[in-house]
Amino acid sequence: MTHIAPRLRRYLNGLKLHYDVSVHARTDTAGETAHAAHVPGDALAKGVLLADDRGAVLAVLPSTHHISVEVLNNALGRRLSLVQEDRLPEWFDDCTPGAVPAAGGAYGVEVVVDPSLECAEEVFFEAGDHRHLVHVDAEGFERLMETARRANFSVHD
């Protein structure tokens, strides 16, 4: 049986989003995940959680990119910093630390998405652990990011 975090499953089902879940060998990084799951790195969305005194923001970007916190802060007018992995369960309580789904709406977290993901025909993202990915088509990803802010904050590795 494939695993998907319960809150994420309820959220996706509530959106009536068509998705499937695939399994891969356990991985620790987004790059390893893309390789193990045989998916293009540009189509694997990773979620990076940042926070400041105003709250948390989930930055969603391709696994082949890294985040520029300074650029993101300038774009949002915030003073965000990366949330340490041991604090992730404060927001993503049904997920394995480090396996943050790119669906902040499921967890009540504000989302900002890098537009470089929006040209992908299909998108994959963590299902809440280090062994499963959620797969949606471009339309599904667009619906998932419907309320997200857009900002260019990532740089290709």
Image (cartoon, rainbow, N blue to C red):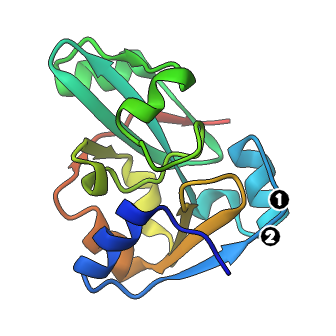
Disc 2 residue type (three-letter):
His
In this rendering, would 23 be left or right of 47?
right
Which residue is identified by label 1? 35
In this rendering, would 11 be left or right of 64?
left
Question: At numbered mark 2, what does the secondary structure look like: helix, strand or loop?
Answer: loop
Looking at the image, which is closer to me, 112 or 56? 56
Q: Are marks 1 and 2 in contact (CB under 8 Å)?
A: yes
Which residue is identified by label 2? 38
At 79% from the left and 67% from the top, the residue drawn is: 24
Q: Position of residue 153 (x, y in %)?
A: 40, 33
In this rendering, would 128 be left or right of 103?
right
Other-residue count near label 2 (Cα within 10 Å), few / some / many at <14 / 14–19 / ≥20: few
Instruction: Tell me the quarter of the picture where residue 8 sits.
Output: bottom left
Classify 148 as above or below 127: above
Give the spatial CA distance, label 1 vs label 2: 5 Å
Question: At numbered mark 1, what does the secondary structure look like: helix, strand or loop?
Answer: helix
Looking at the image, which is closer to me, 24 or 32? 24
Disc 1 residue type (three-letter):
His
Looking at the image, which is closer to me, 1 or 55? 1
Q: Position of residue 156 (x, y in %)?
A: 61, 39
